[in-house]
Amino acid sequence: MPTITRRAPAVTFFVLALGGASFSLLQSLLNPVLPTIQRDLHTDQSTVSWVLIAWILSAAIATPLLGRLGDMIGKKRTFVLALSAVVLGSVLAALSPTIGVLILARVLQGLGGAVFPLSFGIIRDEFPGERVATAVGAMSAVIAVGSGVGVVLAGPIVAALDWRWLFWIPAIVSTITAALAHFIVPESPVRPGGRINWTAATLLAGWLVALLLPLSEASQWGWSSPLTISLLVLSAVLLAAWIAFEARSSNPVIDMRMMRRPAVWTVNLVALFFGGTMFAIFAFLPQFSQTPTSAGYGFGVNITGAGLLMLPMLVTMAIGGFVSGPLSKRIGFKTQLAVGASLVAVSALALAFFNTEAWQVALEAGVFGLGIGFVYSSMTSLIVQAVPSSQTGAASGMNANIRNIGGAIGTAVMTTIVTSHPQASGLPTASAYSTAFLVMGLIAVVAVAVSAAVPSANRVARVSRLELATQS
């Protein structure tokens, strides 16, 4: 099969979108069916939760490291490597005889997290400059929608087949995508080479694990437990050590000078707060909808019904992401970021006060999805514009990681609020959900405020020109 030249960016985009969609599905596909997996593999709730935790930890480590590796040795080569890990992990998961094997499989799948930053880097390398923003927006929409589609598809797939097909389908799609990428996607035109700084990589992995593990298990361990506190303190120490080491290193994994750029740190801070609201509502809105009406709230729907209530969110998410690039010629990405974060905040706050009717939740989910579409697209575009092409993978990888860290924090906070003071039946109270949605809305309001500090495109361009002049 002949290699398609760089004159076919649309074909390249199709392959990247296929890879991004297949991996992003794995973010949410399993959440609704954990009880089924728990029963079939004869395990308990605490152990089955590691199906999610193992994936989160693996993706957190792999996303920036493999993004950096792609910048060094070639984004296409690393993209195929990441997809191969998804294939291997998915096949192993589909065949898992025990919960231990399934957890190991999820670790392998998590390595595919690098697909996201590598895709954005390839788009920047291969697309004409005037089409990069539109392509980045469309790719962001694919990733965002894929993350939500899992909630909608999980129920019908399990009902028609069984939960193991939640892995066979990504395995098949990722295999096809990896083969297409090998033959179709051009290799990076600039590959500076180099080597991974393993001390920096170890410190990065250490503070991420030490932070995300207690956040994922806080509801089980307790926020005041010695293990939770010890790991959070360890994460702070390792984070400080990592920053100090990277700042002095001539071969950093993540360039601290890049991370200090106003256009980078401000967008990353927005990502932290935005991720907190987005992932928490992704996780709990289906649970809220499935609550039996006898609890005094909820709609008593099954997994498929909860997914249908999320459908407006997926539609508007796609709309927001796909129109973001073309719209940027009239409304800049900074403004889109603020508008998107505002829509997320408004919809989360509305969920706190208006949630007694299914149509209210569906409408609020639609507004929420539109905000996510704009934020995802504009955030990635701002990061891509703010860094050199040789750092696109590492920079967008860290942005995705910071968003996921925010998601872990937001989900942990919402879990604590929702599960505190349950009813006699063991179900959460209506007021607990309302309080949790209110807190998530306020977190999104902070994201709106931070977005005001993001530099304008003209200022970013001036800084970039000044840096180039200084280097020359």
Image: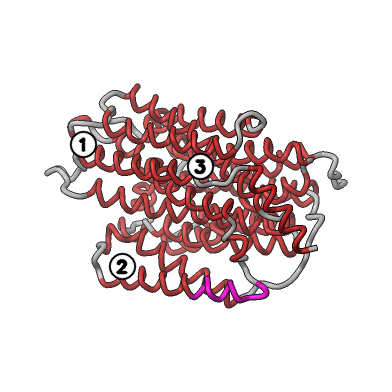
Q: In this view of the protein, which residue sits in the foreground, 217 or 404?
A: 404
Q: Amino acid at mark 1?
A: Ala
Residue on which disc 1 sits: 430
Q: Position of residue 428 (x, y in %)?
A: 21, 42
Q: In this view of the protein, which residue sits in the foreground, 266 or 302?
A: 266
Can residue 341 be spotted in the picture? yes
Residue on which disc 2 sits: 228
Magenta stretch containing residue 50, yes or no?
A: no
> Callout 3 environment at 10 Å: few (<14), some (14 to 19), or many (20+)?
many
Between the residue at mark 2 and the residue at mark 3, the CA separation in whole angstroms equals: 29 Å
Q: In this view of the protein, which residue sits in the foreground, 149 or 211?
A: 211
> Callout 1 environment at 10 Å: few (<14), some (14 to 19), or many (20+)?
many
Label 2 residue SS:
helix
Residue 237, placed above or below residue 357: below
Majority secondary structure of magenta residues: helix
Label 1 residue SS:
helix
In-image side of 442 versus 406 (left or right):
left
Q: Amino acid at mark 3?
A: Ser
Can residue 32 be spotted in the picture? no
Write down the region rendered in magenta: 241-251
Residue on which disc 3 sits: 147
Label 3 residue SS:
helix
Q: Amino acid at mark 2?
A: Thr
Q: In this view of the protein, which residue sits in the foreground, 339 or 136?
A: 339
> Picture quarter containing residue 156?
top left
